[in-house]
Image (spheres, rainbow, N blue to C red):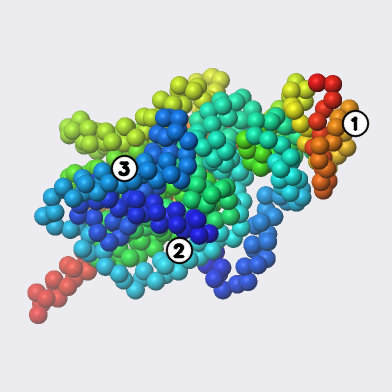
């Protein structure tokens, strides 16, 4: 830390800026897109390539909660990797990132590696 | 960056009459340090009270409420007697302040390398602040939701609400420069420590101690509540220490208020208040009732959040399930857990140095500092008990928190040990000089 005034801080700044998004660097941009296409009070469930809590879903869920404040983000996985299908049914939107999802749904918005879906047959 | 800097400056200006209402003699380092801390703590209370009164946070509502407090504090400060001599006259600048200044610059560069990057920032402290900003008040629905227990809804809100104040000034959420608030809390603590040290030792030693305190006050967990807790808790313990040593009512007031704000930073701050209470009783048994009465402001400040979190039944993870059964199940393995804590201790050589310092200091000096030793020991005991009772995986819990917890208690113990050694060294040097003078 004491060397910071004397070194080129560019690489450190870039590394720290990417620190939270080591696994999925484009995930925050996707979430910002989801935020732009939803309203406060909307319920949103998130589907990502890793649907296990410790190895990726907790990150995806927490990060979505941070970027989508004002909306209610519903988890689809419990900390002990149980499934929460009721949250899938209860969500107004499904934010799908990095995977495909074959369900009857309208695509509200598509951006980067993800899409925001609104399920049919509500 | 401008909004964060303006927020820090505003909080300091806001805190000046409050600091003077509490201590009319405060000047220089003490005034600036306490002013920021009181500004930050009072701004939390302003936002909390507006939220309770269902008044939406806007720049106008927050400024109006703050101005009322500002004027009331200025009125009280003007009425206070001014004939008491200043106790901060010795906090003069010293050449050793340059390395301290350099350390502050380095930490500021580190804390602002990028947007606040810590997991716990965007999963707890920053998340709550951003969520509350959406509705212009504390979002109880969010805190009560079973899906948000990961954000630790029971944690006190001083830090998130300070972030909200910055966001209000900024006109929206921006986490790019929030690390600067951590710098401000650490600098405020260093200024308070400098002022208190100057009462007891030479400018050289006071400046050297400030350098140490500044380095210890900088939390590497940028964006978390550690920085604020270290500042408020550290200042609180140091003021109570001063109050016990010289019986000064002003130090009692400062200490009690700082500890009250520490209790609003983290649950560990609440534990610190309990630790201080026990240590005050233990170190002054016969005068304990009178002294505990002087801690009343701390309990009053801690009460609102305790009541609110009970009223909203916000869960505390450590208290979930059967605490007693977990505690008793792990107690037989306490020695292994303690060994693991020793193994995982962050900066072990620092703690070895503290222990050696305590051992080599004169017995009279050790007795003088028994309050700080007691507080440190009791707080450590609380932390170990929390590990014994944790519902989480113990190894994970230790690895993810132990290094942070030890930073909470580092400043007061360092302050006490340093002064013990510095003053005993000074005493022996004075004795040598006296001997030489007598020979002449």
The chain ID associated with circle 1 is A
Asked if marks 3 and 1 touch (Cβ < 8 Å), the reply is no
Distance between mark 2 and mark 1 Cα atoms = 54 Å
Label 2 or label 3, whichever lies nearer to me, is: 3
Where residue B389 sits: x, y (%)? 52, 28
Checking the image for residue B68, the label placed there is 3
Residue pointed to by mark 2: B104
Measuring 57% from the left and 47% from the top, which residue is drawn there? B173
Checking the image for residue B271, the label placed there is none
Sequence-first tag of 2 and 3: 3
Where residue B369 sits: x, y (%)? 27, 48
Q: Crowding near pointer 2: few (<14 within 10 Å), some, many (20+)? A: many
Q: Quadrant of residue A97?
A: top right
Measuring 56% from the left and 73% from the top, which residue is drawn there? A6
The chain ID associated with circle 3 is B
In the image, is residue A107 above or below residue B90?
Answer: above
Distance between mark 3 and mark 1 Cα atoms = 59 Å
Residue B410 or B238: which is nearer the viewer?
A: B238
Mark 2 secondary-structure assignment: helix
Measuring 67% from the left and 66% from the top, which residue is drawn there? A11
Mark 3 secondary-structure assignment: helix
Residue pointed to by mark 1: A102
Where residue B307 sits: x, y (%)? 41, 25
């Amino acid at each position: 830390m004491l060397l910071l005034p004397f070194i080129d801080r560019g690489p450190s700044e870039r590394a720290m800026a990417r620190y939270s998004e080591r696994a999925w660097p484009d995930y925050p941009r996707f979430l910002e897109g989801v935020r732009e296409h939803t309203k406060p009070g909307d319920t949103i469930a998130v589907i990502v390539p890793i649907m296990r809590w410790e190895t990726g879903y907790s990150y995806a869920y927490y990060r979505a909660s941070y970027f989508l404040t004002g909306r209610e983000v519903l988890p689809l996985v419990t900390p002990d990797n149980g499934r929460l299908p009721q949250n899938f049914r209860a969500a107004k939107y499904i934010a799908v990132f990095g995977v495909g999802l074959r369900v009857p749904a309208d695509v509200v918005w598509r951006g980067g590696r993800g899409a925001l879906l609104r399920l049919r047959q509500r | 960056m401008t909004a964060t800097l303006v927020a820090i400056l505003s909080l300091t200006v806001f805190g000046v009459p409050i600091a003077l209402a509490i201590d009319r003699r405060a000047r220089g380092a003490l005034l600036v340090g306490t002013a920021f801390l009181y500004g930050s703590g009072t701004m939390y209370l302003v936002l909390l009270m507006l939220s309770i009164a269902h008044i939406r946070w806007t720049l106008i509502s927050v400024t109006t409420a703050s101005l009322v407090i500002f004027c009331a504090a200025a009125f009280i400060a003007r009425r206070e007697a001014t004939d008491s001599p200043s106790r901060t006259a010795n906090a003069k600048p010293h050449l050793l302040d340059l390395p301290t200044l350099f350390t502050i610059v380095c930490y500021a560069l580190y804390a602002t390398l990028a947007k606040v990057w810590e997991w716990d920032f965007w999963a707890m402290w920053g998340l709550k602040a951003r969520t509350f900003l959406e509705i212009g008040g504390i979002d109880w629905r969010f805190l009560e939701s079973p899906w948000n227990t990961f954000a630790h809804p029971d944690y006190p809100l001083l830090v998130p609400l300070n972030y909200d104040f910055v966001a209000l000034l900024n006109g929206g959420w921006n986490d790019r420069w929030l690390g600067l608030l951590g710098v401000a809390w650490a600098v405020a603590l260093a200024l308070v420590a400098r002022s208190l040290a100057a009462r007891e030792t030479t400018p050289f030693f006071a400046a050297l101690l400030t350098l140490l305190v500044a380095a210890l006050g900088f939390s590497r967990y940028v964006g978390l509540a550690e920085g604020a807790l270290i500042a408020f808790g550290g200042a609180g313990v140091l003021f109570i220490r001063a109050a016990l040593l010289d019986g000064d009512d002003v130090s009692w007031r400062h200490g009690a208020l700082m500890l009250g704000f520490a209790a609003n930073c983290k649950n560990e701050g609440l534990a610190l208040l309990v630790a201080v209470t026990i240590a005050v009783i233990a170190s002054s048994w016969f005068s304990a009732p009178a002294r505990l009465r002087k801690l009343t402001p701390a309990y009053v400040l801690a009460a609102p959040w305790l009541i609110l979190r009970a009223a909203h039944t916000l869960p505390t993870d450590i208290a979930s399930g059967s605490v007693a059964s977990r505690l008793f199940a792990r107690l037989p393995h306490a020695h292994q857990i303690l060994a693991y804590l020793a193994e995982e201790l962050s900066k072990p050589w620092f703690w070895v140095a503290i222990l050696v310092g305590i051992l080599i200091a004169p017995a009279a000096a050790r007795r003088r500092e028994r309050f700080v030793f007691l507080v440190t020991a009791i707080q450590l005991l609380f932390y170990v008990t929390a590990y014994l009772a944790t519902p989480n995986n113990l190894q994970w819990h230790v690895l993810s928190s132990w290094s942070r917890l030890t930073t909470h208690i580092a400043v007061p113990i360092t302050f006490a040990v340093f002064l013990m050694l510095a003053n005993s060294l000074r005493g022996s040097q004075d004795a040598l000089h006296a001997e030489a003078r007598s020979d002449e």
